[in-house]
């Protein structure tokens, strides 16, 4: 992650098409799963299954993808995140080509929570319907196990609502402070940067 200073700037592609597609399909799938909970179990299961595929793709793309899609380009760091938070509070936050330090930390937390949500959902599908890759295990599981997994699934869902609100707030704040539309950048893939800073 590199600091960007204002001068001789150009539109540089930061987010590749596959990463951008993943991002918006993830948003749509989670929204569909969220809405369908309690309305239509078929849509809920399909959305959850599609989310699993998206997360597996992101794991794969995080190792072999391009530039800023790679996990190695945005390793989480509590020290860098704390420094970035101080800069934000002082209204002197630097601009970054890829994810900011706090943004990097948030991405890992979101992906991990989504993965736990999906795994617990697949376990519940096996326990309650006898479907999916865990069906044979579910046949011998106790009811207490189902109650625990149900709690984990709901805890993750509640946590994700809070994390998404924090994420959206962070995108808004960073967009204002960097004077750059970060949401638009995730649509077009491009940010206005110095070419030697990318």
Image (cartoon, rainbow, N blue to C red):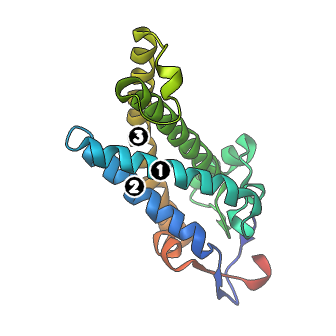
Q: Which residue does the numbered mark 3 point to in the structure image?
A: 162
Residue ID at (45%, 64%): 24
Q: Which residue does the numbered mark 1 point to in the structure image?
A: 51
Residue 196: x percent and y percent? 80, 82
Position of 30 with respect to 36 (left or right) is right
Image marks 3 and 1: residues in contact by CB distance under 8 Å = no
Residue neighbourhood size for the residue with mark 1, other residues' Cα within 10 Å, grouped as few (<14), some (14–19), many (≥20): many
In this rendering, the label closer to the viewer, 3 or 1: 1
Q: Which residue does the numbered mark 2 point to in the structure image?
A: 29
Q: Is residue 67 above or below residue 42?
A: below
Residue 70: x percent and y percent? 73, 60
- Residue 165 visible, this angle: no
Query: Toward which corner of the image does residue 125 lie, by quadrant?
Result: top left
Residue ID at (65%, 75%): 14
Residue 158: x percent and y percent? 38, 34
Observer-nearest of 179 and 68: 68
Which of pointers 2 and 3 lies earlier in the amino acid sequence?
2
Q: Is residue 151 above or below residue 37?
A: above
How far is the residue under mark 3 from the one under mark 1?
Answer: 19 Å
How far is the residue under mark 2 from the one under mark 3?
Answer: 18 Å
Q: Is residue 63 above or below residue 119?
A: below
Position of 198 with respect to 188 (left or right) is right
Residue ID at (63%, 48%): 86
Q: Is residue 187 above or below residue 75?
A: below
In this rendering, the label closer to the viewer, 2 or 3: 2
Observer-nearest of 73 and 141: 141
Residue 156: x percent and y percent? 45, 33
Image marks 1 and 2: residues in contact by CB distance under 8 Å = yes
Task: Identify the secondary structure beneath mark 2.
Answer: helix
Observer-nearest of 99 and 6: 99
- Residue 35 visible, this angle: yes
């Amino acid at each position: 992650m590199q600091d960007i200073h204002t001068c001789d700037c150009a539109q540089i592609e930061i987010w590749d098409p596959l990463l951008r597609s993943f991002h918006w399909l993830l948003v749509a799938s989670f929204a569909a799963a969220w809405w369908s909970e309690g309305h239509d179990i078929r849509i809920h299961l399909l959305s959850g299954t599609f989310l699993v595929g998206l997360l597996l793709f992101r794991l794969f793309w995080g190792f072999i993808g391009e530039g800023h899609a790679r996990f190695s380009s945005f390793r989480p760091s509590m020290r860098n995140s704390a420094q970035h938070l101080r800069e934000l509070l002082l209204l002197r936050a630097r601009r970054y080509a890829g994810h900011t330090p706090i943004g990097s930390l948030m991405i890992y937390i979101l992906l991990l929570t989504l993965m736990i949500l999906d795994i617990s959902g697949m376990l519940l599908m096996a326990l309650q319907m006898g479907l999916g890759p865990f069906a044979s295990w579910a046949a011998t599981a106790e009811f207490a196990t189902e109650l625990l997994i149900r709690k984990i699934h709901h805890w993750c869902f509640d946590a994700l609502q809070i994390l998404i609100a924090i994420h959206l707030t962070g995108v808004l704040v960073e967009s204002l402070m960097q004077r750059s539309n970060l949401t638009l950048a995730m649509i077009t893939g491009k940010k206005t940067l110095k070419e030697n800073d990318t």
